């Protein structure tokens, strides 16, 4: 293929892309039942840093339906930590959890920390309406010692605006869990969160994408095919002209 033909071929791909035939993405899709918070940069930290209370307590997840979730700090004379929990007794909110040992005789419910891509189906072996993200006692941290650990928390809720359909989501969090109850250094930064369509088990870190309406797909597809046909005819004409020249 000579350089002129290569230019023509590239031009064809450019024209087809412009008509929407290559990599077509509809702009008319309905995103009403999806949510992505975007990157959060303010009022998104809960807990203590070197015994100093940080800005937000609690951080409320803005979710559809009656009951949301919140991330809050809590403390007693012997323990301090950050917890994700249901806001109140109304509705339904659950978080993926695991069980950890405080000592040889005691267990506690921890929010399960997940890698990117995990879904409710592959990670949520246990669920409760609360789970401790970080926990300190007088001796030190309980569970893993974490310093700027980026992980995902998985949650589910019933959406009362969609017939109590189940929705599944994730929270992107950076976690510190070290120090002890006398010198608290346990905090969670909420970077972003999202949920998908009803019954869609969204992978951790996956930004939900709207699904085009069937009518939109048909209309867009016809327009793209028509535009592509015009572009193809033009390209063939130009190739013939190149051959004659």
Image (tube, grey):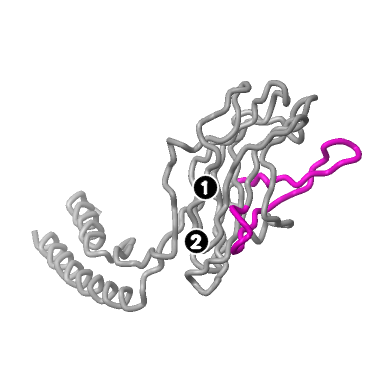
Q: Position of residue 72 (x, y in %)?
A: 60, 41
Q: CA distance from mark 1 to mark 2?
A: 18 Å
The range drawn in magenta is 86-115
Question: Is 62 contained in the magenta span?
Answer: no
In the image, which disc is placed on residue 60?
A: 1
Mark count: 2
In the image, which disc is placed on residue 196?
A: 2
Q: Is residue 105 above or below residue 178?
A: below
Q: Position of residue 124 (x, y in %)?
A: 69, 56
Can you say which quadrant of the picture contains the N terminus? Answer: bottom left
Q: Nearer the viewer, mark 1 or mark 2?
A: 1
Q: Main secondary structure of the magenta part?
A: strand
Q: Are marks 1 and 2 in contact (CB under 8 Å)?
A: no
**Of residues 113 and 7, the one drawn nearer to the viewer in this rendering:** 113
Label 1 residue SS: strand
Label 2 residue SS: loop
The residue shown at (72%, 45%) is 110
Q: Is residue 221 above or below residue 67?
A: below
């Amino acid at each position: 293929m000579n350089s002129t033909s290569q230019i023509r071929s590239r031009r064809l791909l450019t024209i087809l892309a412009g008509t929407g035939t290559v990599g077509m993405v509809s702009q008319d899709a309905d995103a009403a039942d999806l949510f992505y918070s975007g990157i959060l940069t303010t009022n998104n930290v809960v807990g203590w840093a070197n015994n100093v209370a940080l800005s937000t307590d609690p951080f409320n997840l803005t979710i559809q339906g009656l009951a949301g979730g919140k991330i809050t700090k809590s403390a007693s004379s012997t323990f301090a930590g950050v917890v994700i929990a249901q806001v109140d007794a109304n509705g339904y909110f659950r978080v993926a959890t695991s069980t950890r040992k405080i000592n040889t005789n005691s267990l506690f419910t921890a929010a399960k920390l997940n890698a990117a891509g995990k879904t409710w189906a592959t990670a949520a072996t246990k669920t409760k309406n609360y789970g401790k993200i970080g926990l300190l006692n007088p001796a030190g941290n309980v569970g893993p010692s974490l310093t700027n650990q980026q992980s995902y928390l998985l949650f589910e809720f019933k959406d009362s605006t969609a017939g109590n359909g189940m929705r599944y989501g994730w929270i992107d969090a950076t976690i510190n869990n070290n120090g002890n109850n006398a010198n608290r250094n346990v905090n969670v930064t909420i970077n972003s969160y999202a949920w998908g369509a009803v019954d869609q088990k969204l992978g951790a870190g996956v930004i939900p994408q709207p699904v085009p309406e069937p009518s939109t797909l048909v209309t867009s597809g016809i327009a793209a095919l028509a535009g592509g046909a015009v572009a193809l005819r033009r390209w063939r004409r130009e190739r013939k002209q190149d051959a004659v020249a």
